[in-house]
Image (cartoon, rainbow, N blue to C red):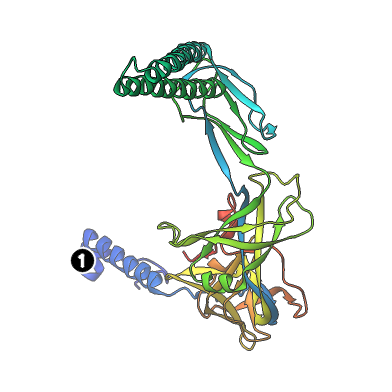
């Protein structure tokens, strides 16, 4: 009786009609099919969790602000003073930032050559005076000779002409001496008005030409605010005419009058240089101090003020993300900015009352993305307008004033 093979015995390769090498290949092929089948199975993707979002519910505010602009305190008149004669500077009497009064001596040049010229002119005048007196005395004698018939009338007329020429030479010498005296006086450079020294362009020992600027003086009598007006606000601001100035150093606001607007725009910034006069400027108002110039319309208009962090710049346009409270998805909405401040902006058109916008992480969102509220604030419709907006970011804060850019 033949014994039965074990239940789990592995059959020999020759029992199935193929060699050992072909058997190995078959096993490898089966294993490969198993691996490929396992790899082809799709792994289920977990849904993206809602992104936490900070939001703000907007309410239209009554804003009469037309525009706010950064500016600097500048003198209305700033003069570059120089000597009226050439020479070598021997002394400078003022320092940068020093306050001066009208008539104060600012600098001196060497007067030696001018004094010699003055002495020469004085000697020429003395000689001319001697000639004049001699000619006049001779004329008296020639008049007696003419009356007695010893000389002709023509000879007397020649003597009269000699006297006239002597008088003219004396007058010429007098004028020459006066001119030289003036030249000698020009060796002292004097302040033409009360002011402060804003620049020194020459030092002692330097030889300067007539008219070359040596000291710059800014007159303190009239002070102004220099600022730039964007072309889209020019007509409105010119119509208003008066503005309010808030110094960044603090203090009460100052009223000013729009005195001057450049007739042409700057080719780089497309804005117009303007000057706002300050009739009641305090005496301690320093030149170069920064300020904000605010122009307000007579009638308030509804507008939306939103945080600067809510703006997104993409596709050459400015957007905000609005939240649909029904399905908690976000959607882009185009906006136009009217004024830009350090932390907020005023939009040219008010957004619908009660609309909810994203205020942080706007560059990480995409259209239709589902979010969840991390925090939500509601804007006070009766809150006064913030006092620190401008149509261009203050110097040194351009990065803070730029909206987020979509990646």
Q: Identify the residue position indicated by label 1 in the image.
A: 18
Position of 219 relative to 154 (above/below)? below
Across and down, in percent, residue 12 comes to 29, 64
Image-quadrant location for residue 103: top right
The quadrant in which the N terminus is found is bottom left
Q: Is residue 327 above or below residue 116?
A: below
Which residue occupies 34% across, 24% down?
157
In the shown orientation, is residue 70 left or right of residue 138? right
Q: Pick whichever, 99 or 322, lies toward us.
A: 99
Which is more toward the observer, 132 or 72? 132
Query: Residue 220 appears in which quarter of the rendering?
Result: top right
Residue 144 placement (x, y as % from top left): 43, 17
Residue closer to the observer: 306 or 280 = 280
Asked whether 213 or 148 is in front, the reply is: 148
Furthest toward the front, the residue is 148
Query: In this picture, is 75 found above or below 112?
Result: below
The spot of residue 260 in percent (x, y) is 55, 60
**Residue at 59 percent of width and 68 percent of height:** 339
Q: Residue at x 52, y 69 (%)?
A: 234
Residue 48, visible in the rendered structure: no
Q: Quadrant of residue 195?
A: top right
> Is disc 1 placed on a helix, strand or loop?
loop
Horizontal relation, residue 333 to residue 353: left or right? left
């Amino acid at each position: 009786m033949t014994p039965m093979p074990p239940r789990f015995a592995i059959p020999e390769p020759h029992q199935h009609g193929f060699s050992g090498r072909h058997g190995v290949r078959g096993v490898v092929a089966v294993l490969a099919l198993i691996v490929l089948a396992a790899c082809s199975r799709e792994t289920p993707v977990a849904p993206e969790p809602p992104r936490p979002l900070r939001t703000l519910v907007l309410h239209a505010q009554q804003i009469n602000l037309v525009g706010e602009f950064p500016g600097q305190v500048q003198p209305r008149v700033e003069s570059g003073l120089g000597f009226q004669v050439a020479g070598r500077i021997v002394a400078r009497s003022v320092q940068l930032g020093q306050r001066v009064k009208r008539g104060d001596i600012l600098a001196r040049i060497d007067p030696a050559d001018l004094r010699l010229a003055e002495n020469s002119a004085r000697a020429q005048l003395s000689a001319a005076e001697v000639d004049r007196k001699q000619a006049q005395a001779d004329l008296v004698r020639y008049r007696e000779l003419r009356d007695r018939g010893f000389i002709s009338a023509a000879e007397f007329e020649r003597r009269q002409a000699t006297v006239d020429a002597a008088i003219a030479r004396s007058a010429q010498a007098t004028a020459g001496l006066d001119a030289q005296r003036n030249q000698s006086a020009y060796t002292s450079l004097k302040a033409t008005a009360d002011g402060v020294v804003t620049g020194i362009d020459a030092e002692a020992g330097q030889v300067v030409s007539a008219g070359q600027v040596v000291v710059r003086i800014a007159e303190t009598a009239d002070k102004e605010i220099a600022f730039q007006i964007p072309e889209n606000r020019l007509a409105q601001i010119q119509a208003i005419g008066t503005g309010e100035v808030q110094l960044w150093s603090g203090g009460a606001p100052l009223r000013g009058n729009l005195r001057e607007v450049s007739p042409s725009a700057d080719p780089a910034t497309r804005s117009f240089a303007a000057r706002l006069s300050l009739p009641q400027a305090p005496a301690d108002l320093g030149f170069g101090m920064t300020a904000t110039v605010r122009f307000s319309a007579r009638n308030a208009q509804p507008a939306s003020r939103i945080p600067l962090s809510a703006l997104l710049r993409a596709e050459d346009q400015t957007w905000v993300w609005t939240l649909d409270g029904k399905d908690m998805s976000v959607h882009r909405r185009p906006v136009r900015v009217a004024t830009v401040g350090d932390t907020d902006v005023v939009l040219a058109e008010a957004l619908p009352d009660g609309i909810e916008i994203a205020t942080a992480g706007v560059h990480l969102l995409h259209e239709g993305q589902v979010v969840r509220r991390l925090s939500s604030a509601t804007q006070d419709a009766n809150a006064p307008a913030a006092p620190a907006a401008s149509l261009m970011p203050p110097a040194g804060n351009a990065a803070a004033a730029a909206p987020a850019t979509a990646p």
